[in-house]
Image (cartoon, rainbow, N blue to C red):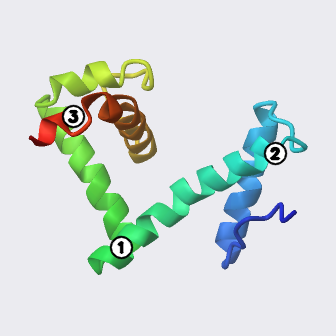
Amino acid sequence: MNTQLLSPTTESNALLMQYITKLLIELGIKPNLKGFNYLKEAIYLHSVIIYTVIADKCCASAKNVERSIRTSIEAVWYRNTLNRSHKLFESAYINADYPPSNTIFIATMSEIIKLTFNKQTYHCFK
């Protein structure tokens, strides 16, 4: 079985994988568990690949994608136009005075969508 699902292509990506591994071990997740490698890959994909995929699709740079997402989150957060967002992020985000990071925002929104989309079953699209 291949324990290295992705092969980081640059030195910085290899260092990121090492850092992720170190953090997971510090959290007490044992490297001998199958889920350890899955978590490592999920964190890596979320940290690196997501911006690259979006950038390729939209003909932009990965840095531009990351910055634009961050700017959008900050804009709506500071304008307080998403009062609901503060409630949505209460459990995932501790300091409501500052916007969540891109990672926390995307992960939280993904979970909310997973939990509610099937219940609505396209009801909102009718």
- Mark 3 in CB contact with mark 2 (< 8 angstroms): no
**What is the C-alpha distance between the residues marked 2 and 1?**
31 Å
User: Where does the C terminus fall, quadrant-wise?
Assistant: top left
Instruction: Tell which of 100 and 54 is nearer to you.
Output: 54
Q: Quadrant of residue 98?
A: top left
Q: Amino acid at mark 2?
A: Lys
Q: Amino acid at mark 1?
A: Ala
- Tell me which label, 3 or 2, sits earlier in the chain: 2
The residue at the point 25 percent across, 30 percent down is: 120
Residue bearing the label numbered 3:
77
Q: Which mark is residue 55?
A: 1
The residue at the point 39 percent across, 46 percent down is: 102
Q: Quadrant of residue 24?
A: top right
- Please determine whether, in this image, residue 120 is positioned above or below residue 75: above
Under circle 1, the secondary element is helix
Where does residue 58 sit, x and y in percent of width and height? Answer: 28, 75
- Tell me which label, 3 or 1, sits earlier in the chain: 1
- Please determine whether, in this image, residue 76 is positioned above or below residue 41: above
User: Where does the N terminus fall, quadrant-wise?
Assistant: bottom right
Crowding at dot 2, Cα within 10 Å, few <14 / some 14-19 / many 20+, comes out as few
Residue bearing the label numbered 2:
34
Does residue 99 appear in the picture of this structure? no
